[in-house]
Image: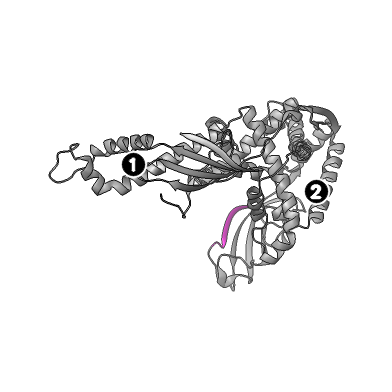
C-alpha cells in the first residue's frame, strides 16, 4: 500500500491510497477460498466448485464485499500511517478499481487541529471547602426533630386543637348515598395541615375521644368517581383518640431511630451532608472556572464541519429566521465549545484516560440510588437505550479528565463558611443569568462542554476511528 498526502489546505487534506493488483488479487483469492467450502451447486461436491463457476455466479457480489473490506482496512491504516485524526467522516472517491486491477482512491479529510495541552499544568483554579459550624449542625437536627413529632394519647375529655393528631373512623355519603371509598378506618389527621379535604380539619377542632362528629366537605375536582366530583359530602366521624404532640428529645435514641450509632455520630453525618450539599455546587463552579481558562488556550484553526454540526445542535427547534439571526452568536459559542472539547480530549488521550466497564456500571448504580423505588425502570431504560449508556460513558470520561486536571494544575484552596458559600453561589447564579440574557439564547440552548465530549468521544474516547463511505460518483478506468 502506498499512501501520499496531497492538496494541503490548512486542515483539509487529500490522501491518495494505491494498492497494487497483486495485493488486490490476494484479497480476492482469500475470499474465493473462504466461500468455496460453503457453496453448494448442483453437480459439484462441497468445496470442489471451480473458481470460474464461482466467479460467474457470485463474482460481482464477492468483489463488492472484498472492496468494502479493503477500503475500511486501508483507509484506517492510511490515516494512522500519516498520523491524521479526522474531524468528522472523510469523503472517499474511487479512482481505479475492478477485479484483477489495482485499487486507487482519494480520501478527502478535515484534520483535527494540533492541540498543545502543556499549559494545563500552569492553569490556576479555586478549590473550595466549607467549614460547617456546630450551630448549623444543631439547627439542622432540630429541624429534623420538628418534622418528626412524637404524639402521646391524651386522657379522656381532652379537646383536640390545632397541631393535634386525631385518629378516627368515618362513613361518608353524597346525597345520602354511600360511594366507592366512602369508608375509612383508623384514619390519622394532623389538624391544621389540611391534607385530607379542604376545611375538614377545622371542623374537628374541639372533638374528644369517643365523640361522633358530622363533617361536611366538598369532594375534589380530580376525585376518582367523576359523577360525584365537586359535590358536597357528609362524613360521620367516630373519634377513636386525640393525641398531643410531644417535644422530641434529641438524644442517642433519637439518633438511632435515624440510623446513626449515637448522637455524636448523627452530628458527624449531618455535618458531612451539609458539606456535600455545598461541595457539589462549588465543584461545579470550579469546573466552570477551569473550562473558562481552557477557552483562553490558542488553537489556530477550528474545523468548519464541526462548527456547522454544533450550530445545528444549538439551533434545534428554532425557525430558520430565528436561527439565521442567532447564527453569529451560535458560531462563537460553537467555537468555544469545540475548542474546549478538543483540549479535554487531547489531554485525555495523552494521559491514556479510559472508562472501564466497572466504572460505567458504578455510575449506573449511582443513578439507581438516586431514584429509590424506580430502580427497575431506570435499569430497563439503560438496557434498551445504548445511546444513554454512551452518554453516561461520556460523562464519566469527562469527570475523570477534570479530576486529573485538578491534580496536575495549581489549585488555590479556600476554606469558607456556609454563609460565604451561599454568597459565592448566589453571585455565580446571577452572573450565569446575566450571561444568558446577554447571549440572547433560550435556557434550553444553554451550552455545556459535556455535550461535545459525549458526541465526539463517548464510544472510544482514547482513539476515535473514522467511518469511510464511498461517494456515489466514481470513475472507472
Q: Nearer the viewer, residue 206 or 343?
A: 343
354 inside magenta stretch: no
**Where residue 354 sits: x, y (%)?**
58, 30
Question: Quick check: marks 1 and 2 in contact, CB under 8 Å?
Answer: no
The residue labelled by disc 2 is 432
Measured in 3D between alpha carbons, the distance from the residue under mark 1 to the one under mark 2, in whole angstroms, is: 64 Å
**Where residue 308 sits: x, y (%)?**
65, 53
Question: Which residue sits furthest bottom?
Answer: 175
Question: Can residue 179 be seen from the camera position used here?
Answer: yes
Q: Provide the residue span drawn in magenta.
A: 181-187
**Where residue 196 sits: x, y (%)?**
66, 58
Q: Residues within 10 Å of mark 1 (few under 14, many from 20)?
A: some
The residue labelled by disc 1 is 100
Q: Earlier in the sequence, mark 1 or mark 2?
A: 1
Image quarter of the N terminus: top left
183 inside magenta stretch: yes
Q: Residue at horizontal 45%, vertical 40%?
A: 72
Which disc is residue 268 wearing? Answer: none
Q: Residue at horizontal 33%, vertical 41%?
A: 100
Q: Quadrant of residue 150?
A: top right
Chief secondary structure of the magenta portion: strand
444 versus 459 height, above or below: below
Question: Position of 137 compared to 225: left or right?
Answer: right
Question: Can residue 243 be seen from the camera position used here?
Answer: no
Question: Position of 196 compared to 99: left or right?
Answer: right
Amino acid at each position: 500500500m502506498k499512501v501520499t498526502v496531497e492538496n494541503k489546505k490548512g486542515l483539509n487534506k487529500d490522501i491518495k491510497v494505491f494498492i497494487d493488483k497483486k495485493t488486490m488479487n490476494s484479497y480476492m483469492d482469500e475470499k474465493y477460498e473462504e466461500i468455496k467450502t460453503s457453496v453448494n451447486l448442483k453437480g459439484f461436491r462441497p468445496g470442489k466448485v471451480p473458481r470460474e463457476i464461482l466467479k460467474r455466479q457470485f463474482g460481482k457480489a464477492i468483489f463488492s464485499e472484498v472492496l468494502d473490506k479493503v477500503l475500511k482496512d486501508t483507509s484506517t491504516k492510511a490515516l494512522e500511517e500519516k498520523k491524521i485524526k479526522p474531524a468528522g467522516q472523510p469523503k472517499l472517491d474511487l479512482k481505479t478499481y475492478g477485479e484483477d486491477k489495482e485499487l486507487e482512491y482519494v480520501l478527502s479529510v478535515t484534520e483535527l487541529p494540533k492541540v498543545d495541552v502543556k499549559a494545563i499544568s500552569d492553569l490556576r483554579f479555586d478549590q473550595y471547602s466549607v467549614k460547617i459550624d456546630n450551630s448549623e449542625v444543631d439547627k439542622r437536627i432540630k429541624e429534623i426533630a420538628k418534622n418528626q413529632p412524637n404524639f402521646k394519647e391524651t386522657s379522656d375529655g381532652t379537646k383536640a386543637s390545632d397541631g393535634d393528631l386525631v385518629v378516627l373512623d368515618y362513613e361518608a355519603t353524597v346525597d345520602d348515598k354511600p360511594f366507592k371509598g366512602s369508608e375509612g378506618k383508623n384514619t390519622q389527621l394532623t389538624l391544621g395541615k389540611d391534607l385530607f379535604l379542604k376545611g375538614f380539619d377545622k371542623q374537628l377542632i374541639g372533638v374528644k375521644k369517643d365523640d361522633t362528629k358530622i363533617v361536611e366537605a366538598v369532594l375534589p375536582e380530580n376525585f376518582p368517581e367523576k359523577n360525584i366530583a365537586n359535590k358536597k359530602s357528609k362524613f360521620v366521624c367516630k373519634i377513636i383518640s386525640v393525641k398531643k404532640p410531644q417535644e422530641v428529645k434529641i438524644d442517642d435514641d433519637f439518633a438511632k431511630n435515624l440510623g446513626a450509632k449515637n448522637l455524636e455520630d448523627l452530628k458527624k453525618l449531618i455535618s458531612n451532608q451539609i458539606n456535600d450539599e455545598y461541595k457539589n455546587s462549588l465543584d461545579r463552579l470550579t469546573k466552570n472556572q477551569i473550562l473558562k481558562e481552557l477557552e483562553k488556550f490558542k488553537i489556530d484553526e477550528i474545523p468548519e464541519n464541526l462548527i456547522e454540526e454544533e450550530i445545528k445542535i444549538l439551533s434545534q427547534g428554532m425557525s430558520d429566521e430565528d436561527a439565521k439571526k442567532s447564527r453569529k452568536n451560535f458560531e462563537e459559542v460553537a467555537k468555544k465549545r469545540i475548542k474546549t472539547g478538543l483540549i479535554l480530549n487531547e489531554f485525555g488521550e495523552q494521559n491514556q484516560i479510559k472508562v472501564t466497564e466497572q466504572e460505567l456500571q458504578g455510575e449506573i448504580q449511582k443513578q439507581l440510588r438516586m431514584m429509590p423505588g424506580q430502580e427497575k425502570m431506570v435499569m430497563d431504560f439503560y438496557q434498551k437505550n445504548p445511546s444513554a449508556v454512551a452518554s453516561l460513558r461520556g460523562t464519566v470520561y469527562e469527570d475523570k479528565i477534570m479530576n486529573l486536571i485538578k491534580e496536575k494544575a495549581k489549585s488555590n484552596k479556600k476554606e469558607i463558611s456556609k454563609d460565604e458559600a451561599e454568597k459565592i453561589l448566589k453571585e455565580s447564579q446571577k452572573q450565569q443569568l446575566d450571561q444568558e440574557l446577554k447571549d440572547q439564547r433560550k435556557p434550553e440552548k444553554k451550552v455545556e462542554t459535556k455535550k461535545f465530549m459525549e458526541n465526539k468521544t463517548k464510544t472510544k474516547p482514547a482513539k476515535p476511528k473514522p467511518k469511510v463511505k464511498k461517494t456515489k460518483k466514481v470513475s472507472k478506468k
